[in-house]
Structure formats: C-alpha cells, structure tokens
Image: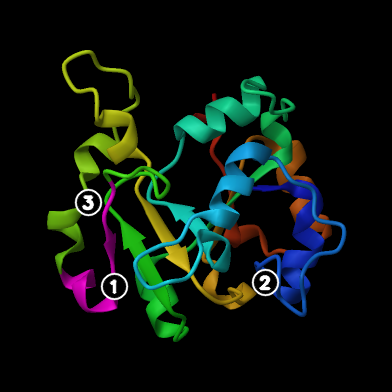
C-alpha cells in the first residue's frame, strides 16, 4: 500500500527501498512512524534488519490499513482515495530474480518465524490463509489471530514496475489519477471493498 502521490516515482523506478540509489526523496509515508522505526532496529535470523526489505501483506483490508485510514496510534488519517495497492505475486518476485523471505505472522512479533526461498514450496502449510482472508482479527478464542493475519512477504531489492501486476484503488477519481500517469486501464482495478 502506498500513497497515490508516490505513484509517479513508482512508474519511473519501481517500488524502491529507503537506502536505494533510486529512493524517492519526496516519499509520502502513510504508515505508523513508530513501527517503521522499530523495523529499522529489528534484526531477523539472517542478520539483516527489516528495513532491508520491502514488505507486502498476502491479502487486503489488513489491520494496518485500518490504522492508516482511521488515524489511530498517532498515525495521520489518510483517505481511501489516496491509498493504492501495488499488487504482485510470489511468482512475479521469483521470476524477477529478487531475494525474499516470508513470515508466518507480523514480522516484529517474537512469535513469528522467518522462512527462506527453499521453503516457498510449503507456503500453503506455513501461512494461515484462512485467518489472513478473514475480515475480523479480534477473537477472544484466538488471541494470536491478528499476528498470523499480518504475515509478511519481504523483498530485499527494489521491485521493478514490471513485477507489479495490478494497481487497486478505491474509486474512479483515484483510477483517473493513475490513468493520467500513464498506467494502462487494464492494470487498474476499482476495489472499494479492499478499504474500510
């Protein structure tokens, strides 16, 4: 998920890391600043920090989107119209020869485990896709549900524009903005149900 103001840069350079030579100097953040800072200091089993990776969720309408749209936890609210889903696939990342790891829950949670490319064949066993696709994440009978819902796919390099299959937006106004930037109509989906 990115702010729509970042899309012109994405079309030129792809999705770039903060330390990339092509990093967006005018990047408009929409996430939780405290969480981003924590990720900068969070080491994963391979000795790298989470800030070395571009994170993806496996589904839409995640808890972080709720925080971004509603403006909780000190996060400034961002309207749905200004949030773009950049959708790729595991196959697109593999075919682009990008390095990655993935988790079975929120990456900064001590209960989550990290998995490397040789384990991608078992992703359906490792990731709880039933929970990921569930609309609700608060469950008194399953206190670990939110963590599992927020499993991550983490890509180590800049992601070229060609690896992004679809852009999903909230409404026609957002789609019109992407069309003006030159994104083909068939790569933009209006998916209001992806938002709160």
Assess disc 1: are there few (<14), some (14-19) or many (≥20) residues with their C-alpha within 10 Å of its C-alpha.
few
**Badge 2: residue crowd in 10 Å (few <14, some 14–19, many ≥20):** some
Residues under numbered marks 2 and 3 in contact, where contact means CB atoms less than 8 Å apart: no
Counting labels gives 3
The location of residue 92, given as percent across then percent down, is 43, 74
Q: Secondary structure at mark 2?
A: loop
Q: At x 24% / y 30%, what residue is drawn?
A: 144
The residue tagged 2 is: 14
Mark 1 vs mark 2: give the one in front. 1
From what the image shows, is residue 192 above or below residue 33?
above
Instruction: Please report the bounds of the magenta region as a residue range.
Output: 112-121
| Disc on the earlier residue, 3 or 1 | 1
Residue at image coords 58%, 73%: 159
Residue 93 sits in which quadrant?
A: bottom left
Q: Nearer the viewer, residue 114 or 31?
A: 114
Q: Which mark is residue 33?
A: none
Q: Is residue 83 above or below residue 53?
A: above
User: In the rendered image, which residue does mark 1 sit on?
Assistant: 116
* Quadrant in the picture for residue 82: top right
Where does label 3 land, which residue? 127
Q: Earlier in the sequence, mark 2 or mark 3?
A: 2
Can see residue 26? yes
Q: CA distance from mark 1 to mark 2?
A: 23 Å
| Proximity of marks 3 and 1: CB atoms separated by less than 8 Å | no
């Amino acid at each position: 998920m990115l702010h729509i103001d970042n899309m012109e840069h994405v079309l030129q350079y792809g999705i770039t890391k903060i330390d990339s030579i092509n990093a967006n100097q005018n990047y408009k953040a929409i996430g939780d600043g405290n969480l981003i800072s924590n990720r900068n200091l969070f080491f994963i089993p391979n000795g790298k920090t989470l800030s070395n990776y571009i994170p993806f969720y496996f589904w839409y309408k995640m808890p972080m989107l709720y925080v971004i749209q509603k403006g909780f936890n000190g996060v400034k609210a961002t309207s749905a119209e200004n949030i773009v889903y950049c959708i790729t696939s595991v196959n697109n990342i593999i075919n682009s020869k990008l390095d990655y790891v993935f988790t079975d829950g929120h990456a900064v949670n001590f209960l989550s485990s990290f998995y490397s490319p040789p384990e991608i064949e078992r992703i359906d066993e490792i990731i709880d896709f039933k929970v990921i696709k569930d609309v609700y994440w608060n469950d008194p009978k399953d206190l670990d549900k939110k963590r599992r819902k927020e499993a991550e796919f983490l890509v180590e390099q800049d992601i070229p524009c060609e690896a992004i299959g679809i852009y999903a937006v909230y409404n026609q106004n957002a789609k019109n903005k992407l069309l003006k930037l030159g994104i083909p109509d068939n790569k933009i989906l209006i998916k209001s149900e992806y938002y709160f």
